[in-house]
Image: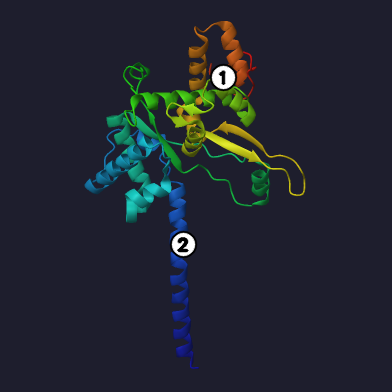
Amino acid sequence: MPPSQRRRRDVVEDDDMEEEQRPRQRQNRDETEDDASMGSDEDTTMGGLSGNGEDDQLAKKLVRYAISCEYARTPIKRDGIREKVLGNQSRSFRRIFSLAQHQLRSAWGMELRELPTREKMSLHERRQAMKSNSQPKLGSRSYILTSTLPDAYRDPAILCPSKTPSAEAEATYVAFYTMMVSLIWLNSGELSDQKLRRYLMRLNADQNVSTEKTEMTLKKMERQGYVIKKTERPPVGQDGEQSVSWLVGPRAKEEIGLDGVLGMTREVYGDSNPELEKKLRASLGIRENADEDGSTSRNGGGRMAEGD
């Protein structure tokens, strides 16, 4: 082959290799930008945050999507935002997310907050995580809407229960899952299924919760992220019964939190007193450690005695 033809062939092959590499590089760059696109406080606290007309419309669309998901207590997933809101503008996630956060905070008194990642709880999951060489995820990539209203506007007289299906049914459901989450948290964050059934019998809720079967309510709580049902099976080849226990779910950690558990328990036991506060902090494993700057730290854990 003449040298001139050989040179032309080499140039064509180099061009083909560059074309093959470009999509891979573009895909890796998009994934990196998407991972780094989580809206932070610095992005959403800038005064006068605004965008062009198309960005504003996408931000409003994201706000509507977030409110509709939260109404059904469905996690607002980043993949859902890219698919149902952004479409072919998925690379604008960070900008649109920041605009939507600004609109939610200024007009709705809410904000999108990322849910905590689900921990590896079962022995099988922990072993799989140890065998895997994959890097841990930086976030759950799922969000819920939380209120940013001042405490003065969070009075029950103002924040009435939803009327769907009815105000009474909604209030009963909120009270029930708050009570269940509080019981789990007060039992070191994990409650056996047997003990849960005993609590349900004491509450006269072992068969029904309002007009719904208790099992259906527990499944709904699990689906919505208020609780996690953990099932431990005996190793292969060994006899034994499987154990079932309940843990606090990611939505409960954000929506209720330790402050909600403290408030719920104080309402049940009446006026707060030093003895009650001491038992509560011991049960929840809360230690008030005064730092040099005067701040305090909390550590979860502990157990409240069943008779307390």
Q: Is residue 272 above or below residue 228?
A: above
Residue in the image at 64% along x and 52% along y: 132
Could you tell which of marks 2 and 1 lies nearer the N-terminus? 2
Residue under label 2? 25
Count the numbered circles shown: 2
- Three-letter code, disc 2: Gln
Disc number lying in front (2 or 1): 1
Q: Residue at x 33, y 37 (%)?
A: 67
Q: Could you tell me which residue is drawn at 54 percent across and 6 percent down? A: 273
Tag 2–tag 1 contact (CB < 8 Å):
no
Mark 1 lies on a secondary structure that is helix
Q: Residue furthest bottom?
A: 1
The image shows residue 262 at horizontal and vertical percentages of 52, 17
Judged left or right of residue 299, residue 113 is: left
Check disc 2: other Cα within 10 Å, few if <14, some if 14-19, many if 20+.
Answer: few
Residue 143: % across, % down: 43, 39
| Badge 1 amino acid | Arg
Residue 153 or 170: which is nearer the viewer? 170
How many C-alpha atoms fall within 10 Å of the one at disc 1: few (<14), some, or many (≥20)?
few
User: Residue 61, percent across and down?
Assistant: 29, 44
Tag 2 secondary structure: helix
